[in-house]
Image (cartoon, rainbow, N blue to C red):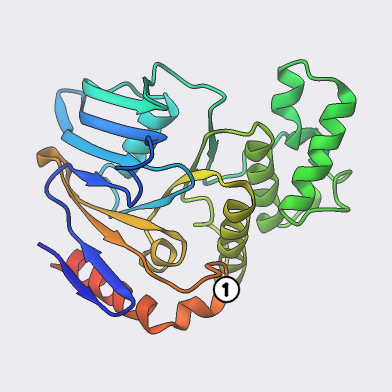
Amino acid sequence: MSATAKGLALVPEPAGHADGPRASAVRPVLSFEQVGFDYDGRAIMRDVSFAIAPGELVAVLGPSGCGKTTILNMVAGFLKPTAGAALIGGREIAGPGPDRGVVFQAAALFDWMTVADNIAFSLRCAGRPKAEQRQVASEMAALVGLSGVEGLYPYQLSGGMRQRVGLARVLAAKPKVMLMDEPFSALDVQTREVLQEEVLRIKERTGCTILFVTHSIDEAVFLGDRIFLLNDLKEGRFEEFRVDLPAPRANGENRLHPAFIRLREAIYRQMRH
């Protein structure tokens, strides 16, 4: 079934088959093929399939315990499907790798390292020259709005600034896919909205593909090119909502746009139902 309105597209897909707007023309960067996962003898999901095109931001939305973080952890390589296959670039995910980077709920920074050293940590582990580490740290700090604080330590930063450092650290590794697990959930509303806009600007500048897990309908609608609303993954069922908001997407005024309000209401009603 589907419903459409001006400035709004609601496309609940058949169970387990949600393909991005460019998936038929462009090879997906990330896909699930009839993925199942059991934990402690209990089925978490069955026959889940989807495809995400390069450069898309897909928001995964749903209540606690619905399988959002399980999907993210399988993409990250922390969990392995018990059935089907999780693929990146057409290859089965066998474990964690540099083609994926995770931004966690907590920034998880090294307290004894400066901002610059935290950002450049992956390059240091890879044995890259110190000059390259400094250059990349400076570029990534500028990208996330942290120029001038590269010499500070995490304890000297606000919560929002620490999350920016975590974001910059992931971007420094130039992953194909950035995985974001409710990274702004602990922040105040104003800081959260600023960082949401920052994510969209970074996506526009880098072309990075993003899988963004959230509990917030507003966050999903503001950020997503598409939204996967999880309902019953044990039956492989979820619904896909396509987002149609004016460019530039990072414009905070989009939160007041009629299309935003209509889509937010439609998802809210679907979740309540």
Q: Does residue 129 appear left or right of residue 76 in this picture?
A: right
Give the image location of residue 60, x and y in percent: 34, 50
Residue 273 seen by the camera: yes
Residue 114 seen by the camera: no
**Type of the residue with mark 1:** Asn
Residue annotated with mark 1: 251
Residue 268 drawn above or below residue 170: below
Residue positioned 43% across, 18% down in the render: 95
Circle 1: element type: loop
Residue 245 drawn above or below residue 17: below
Residue 16 drawn above or below residue 89: below
Residue positioned 55% across, 44% down in the render: 208
Q: Quadrant of the C terminus?
A: bottom left
Foreground residue among 144 and 44: 144
Residue positioned 79% across, 36% down in the render: 136
Give the image location of residue 10, x and y in percent: 23, 66
Give the image location of residue 178, x and y in percent: 52, 40
Foreground residue among 107 and 2: 2
Picture quarter containing residue 112? top right
Give the image location of residue 177, x and y in percent: 50, 37
Q: Does residue 247 appear left or right of residue 9 in this picture?
A: right
Q: Quadrant of the N terminus?
A: bottom left
